Amino acid sequence: MGLALLAVIWLITFVSTYFFIWHPWWLPAGVSASAAAIDHQFVTTYILMGIVFVLAQCSLGLFAWQYRDRGSSAPPVDYSHGNTTMEIVWTVLTGVLFVGLNLMGSKIWAAERFEPAQASAVPVEVTGMQFAWYFRYPGPDGKFGITNPKLMDPSAGSEAAIGLDTSDPAAKDDVVTGTMFLPVNRQVDFTLRAVDVIHSFFIPNMRFKQDAVPGLAIHMHVTPTQIGDYEIACAELCGLGHYKMHGMVKVVSQEDFDKWIAAREAEKQ
Amino acid sequence: MDRRAGGGETIMATSEVVHAHAGPQGFIRKYIFSLDHKVIGIQYFFLALTAVWVGMFLSLLMRIHLIWPQVNLPIVGHIQPETYLSLLTMHGTIMVFFVLTTAPQGGFGNYFLPIQIGAPDMAFPVLNMLSFWTTFVAFVVMLAAFFVTGGAPLHGWTGYPPLSAVQSTGPGEGLGADLWITSIAIFCAASLMGALNFITTTLDLRAKGMTLMRMPLTVWSWFITAILGLLAFGVLLSAGILLLMDRNLGTSFFVPVIVVNGQLMGHKGGSPLLWQHLFWFFGHPEVYIAILPGMGVTSQILSTFARKPIFGYRAMVYAMLGIGFLGFMVWGHHMFMSGMSPYSAFAFSLLTMAIGVPSAIKTFNWLGTLYKGRIRFYTPMLFAVGFVSLFVSGGLSGPFLAQPTLDIPLHDTYFVVGHFHLIMGVAAIFGIFAATYYWFPKMFGRMMNEGLGKAHFWLTFIGTYAIFMPMHYLGMAGHPRRYSQLTEVAYLHNLIPLQTFMTYAAFITIGAQFIFVINLFWSMLKGPKAADNPWDATTVEWTTATPPPHDNFGGQTPVIHNGPYEYGVPGAARDFVMQTDPAVGAAH
Ligand code: HEM
Ligand SMILES: [Cu+2]
Ligand SMILES: [Cu+2]
């Protein structure tokens, strides 16, 4: 029985580790300025935890087999109540390991969330509602117009859905779309809102996630670094359509972005 | 093999009668509204057993729906995407509350805490009975949510408002959601009664010589769990009442101005994050409520079957106290992406990493207990070793999720589902299985079948790894949790083969659980009669008759002379010295 435990525990350990190393399933390609640092922290944690995982599981299997009851021929058990030195050693070691990892990662977090967006960032307001995302650009005036909950009409989509108050002059040039366009290599200044329940704005490729909470306007920034189409998935349970609350980010060159936004402005006139 | 001979000294030591409620007459007082902690323990056990089958059946339906969304099942019919979310909510809630909180504490704790400390019953037998029946009512109310119009709620076991606070946010958010919250509130009240009882019993009813540092680690784990329960359930109860008021009385604790389906709701000024703070102030300690008794029983069983004292008894106690204490300061690690201040994430993440240290100490000490032991592989021991393995696997994904930076890609993905199933779900269930196989002889007077027990272990051990390990891969690939269909988001399509594999693994694992129930009921009726101390164990429950008499010790009160895990004592007559035997120091 000890041998069977050894075999099965080792097998589970090696099969799991094999898939972690071979990684047919892995973080999707990173396409934002912060992705490299986050992935690096991920891989560091991964290697360290992987080593602890393999060591702990293998010793468990080994001990189960080596110290099985071998009948009367066996040496007497080691009558010991523990070993304080060893307790202290492994307490300090795990303490250093865990706290060290934590401190390493915290720089990235600080850069992501403590600093405000740059003045040159593209402002985009993201609004989540059951079960769609809308994106608003402030237009040439650089100002978002007023929205009013009383005017919200989700069935009409876009501007009406987010309750844009068209009597506000600042609202006249606002562009509202269902697909997000972003210029490459420029920081984006998101304002995240939700009108009904909590949603979560998740762009796996950009290593970006932030809940959108009714009653709050949350500011976040991210810099896309590669042209391409990336999926947005909702990551907070928001009701029966949660699984289909997805969208697209199209990262394009600055020129294409300018053309696109000009075309949207023209449509509005 | 009556081991009481060895503990003969106990019987003469004192005959003080501490507590005397007469043995009850009649079926109802004896088996239904019983005041006997042993009967109540068994009632809790069967309640949890019923609940785990319901919860497991729901998970099976979920797994089927994920892979074959169009299939028409007999009786159940065709599962809609929103039904998936109701199944999800009820599965999670039933598993967390009615299985993991109920079986280890209400079941085994109730039965064995008094006996292990040499007490004739709980401190408050009537409160104990009330606590069970209140839990039972909570369970009935919970199940009722399935049968009302709109069905069970779809807001998940965490019930985040506004989704859970406003009727029109989805099907199931009407009466079903009210029943769900009410059930949880009733459950909280029941748990508070239980917690008071456990704490008082441990503090006041210990037999002579049962100092705190001679208590078995199981007793420590139930005691600490009770303290956590006392502090945590009160908060959830209040939060639940506030949520009910938001839903039905027009208050706005958790709901700001919102527009649902184009309808402006009458709320304003509430904070959805307030609920999350209250919920997780309860919710994080709750995961320790679920797992601490499993740690206790694993320590007890590893020591018993390795025939060695537990490695670092004091460190084990301090580690559990440390986990309990720190457990109240880390709730924010569930909220890194919620919109709370990013500065507080620093503190929560550091404290969460700190809580990993006592957890690691426990793992090292379990390995230290096996080291140079003489391991007997009976089924309880297999499950205890399985617990350690699962605890390691589930525990090591914690340091990922504890770092806010890594929580950005991982939060609310299947990585989290894999993490908490391994460490809280399956590890705790292994603790319950280990406890069942270990104490069944004492509770029912018969042995369980070893062959069936081992078959059950192997299939469950391999099966649960096969279900839950791949969830980590899904999560890394960005698969959000609580998705009822995999067809809409394009990048999920590649992950369907892995999901399919997990569904097949779930079929096998769930199938294996029939072996367990067959073994359980067959052994209750037909198993070979058990001796008083079939495992050559040291703690006090093994000194008394099997099954124990109504007052636990037949009019006697045990006197304790030894620590709980005196195995392999050099120079002793047997390879174990019971807690009631003459003191180890005196023996050589
Ligand atoms: C046969 C074993 C089990 C299977 C196959 C299973 C499967 C699942 C699945 C498929 C989900 C939904 C994942 C998602 O869509 O996000 C889930 C959620 C959950 N399960 Fe299990 N599970 C099992 C056992 C358990 C146990 C023993 C527990 C005890 C803690 C548990 C607790 C939960 C919780 C708390 C949730 C989250 C519910 C929510 O998101 O609100 N499960 N499970
Ligand atoms: Cu959603
Ligand atoms: Cu937690």
Image (cartoon, grey):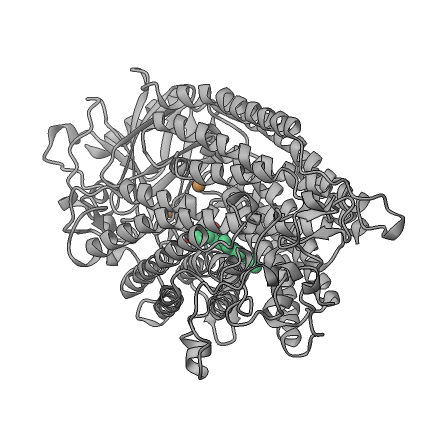
Seen as rendered, the residue at the extreme bottom is B26
Work out which quarter of the rendered image holds the N terminus of chain B and state it.
bottom right
Position of residue A145 measured from the top left corner of the image (x, y, whole percent): 17, 31
Does residue B511 lie above or below A118 as drawn? below
Q: Is residue A27 visible?
A: yes
Q: Is residue A143 left or right of residue B221?
A: left
The one of B189 and B269 positioned closer to us in this rendering: B189
Seen as rendered, the residue at the extreme right is A73
Position of residue B257 measured from the top left corner of the image (x, y, whole percent): 18, 44
Does residue A222 lie above or below B202 as drawn? above
Q: Total of numbered circles in the picture?
A: 0
Position of residue B511 measured from the top left corner of the image (x, y, whole percent): 63, 66
Does residue B558 lie above or below A83 as drawn? below
Does residue A199 lie above or below B442 as drawn? above
Q: Quadrant of ligand 3?
A: top left
Q: Is residue A200 left or right of residue B260?
A: right
The one of B99 and B158 positioned closer to us in this rendering: B99
Q: Residue at x 79, y 54 (%)?
A: A1
Q: Residue at x 42, y 44 (%)?
A: B285
Work out which quarter of the rendered image holds the C terminus of chain B and state it.
top right
The one of A208 and B458 positioned closer to us in this rendering: B458
